[in-house]
Amino acid sequence: MEAARSVSEERLMDLEKRVRLLEERAHRVLWSEPHAGMSRADEMAARYGEYVDKTTAAGILGVTRATVYAMLSDGRISGGCGGRRVSVRSIAEYMQKTAPTDRRTCRRS
């Protein structure tokens, strides 16, 4: 019984260590500054790939999938892969163009 308890405690400690490492890695990825010399589009392409599905695009932009479809149809962002996916670089360019330059503008919305 004692041996089983020590094995369980060791496994628990190992799992806790793995969780801590994963949390640290996720924190670095989510909160890291853009790599030196990389444009925002290059950084986003490195993180997500060149093309993402419409659900992921909606998550990146903070909008609904319906809005992503509307943005594709009116040309604000561009698609790829036969219209099934969205270009990450076009998302980055759109975000760059529409980013408020003044903090007071952000507070008003």
Image (cartoon, rainbow, N blue to C red):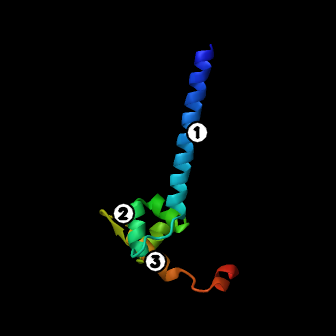
The answer to which of marks 2 and 1 sits earlier in the sequence is 1
Which amino acid, mark 3? Answer: Tyr
The answer to which of marks 3 and 1 sits earlier in the sequence is 1
| Residue 77 can be seen in this image | no
| Left/right of residue 48 with respect to residue 10 in the rendered view | left
CA neighbours of label 3 inside 10 A, class few (<14), some (14 to 19), many (20+)? some
Q: Which residue is denoted by mark 1 in the rendering?
A: 16
Residue 104 versus residue 33: which sits nearer the camera? Answer: 33
Disc 2 and disc 1: Cα gap in Å? 35 Å
For the residues carrying marks 2 and 1, which lies nearer the camera in this image?
1
Residue 106 versus residue 84: which sits nearer the camera? Answer: 106
Residue 44 versus residue 84: which sits nearer the camera? Answer: 44
Give me the disc on residue 49: none
The answer to which of marks 2 and 3 sits earlier in the sequence is 2
> Measuring 59% from the left and 32% from the top, which residue is drawn there?
12
Q: Which residue is denoted by mark 3 in the rendering?
A: 94
> Measuring 38% from the left and 66% from the top, which residue is drawn there?
45
Q: Outermost residue, left direction?
A: 82
CA neighbours of label 2 inside 10 A, class few (<14), some (14 to 19), many (20+)? many
> Measuring 56% from the left and 23% from the top, which residue is drawn there?
7
Q: Position of residue 79 (x, y in %)?
A: 36, 68
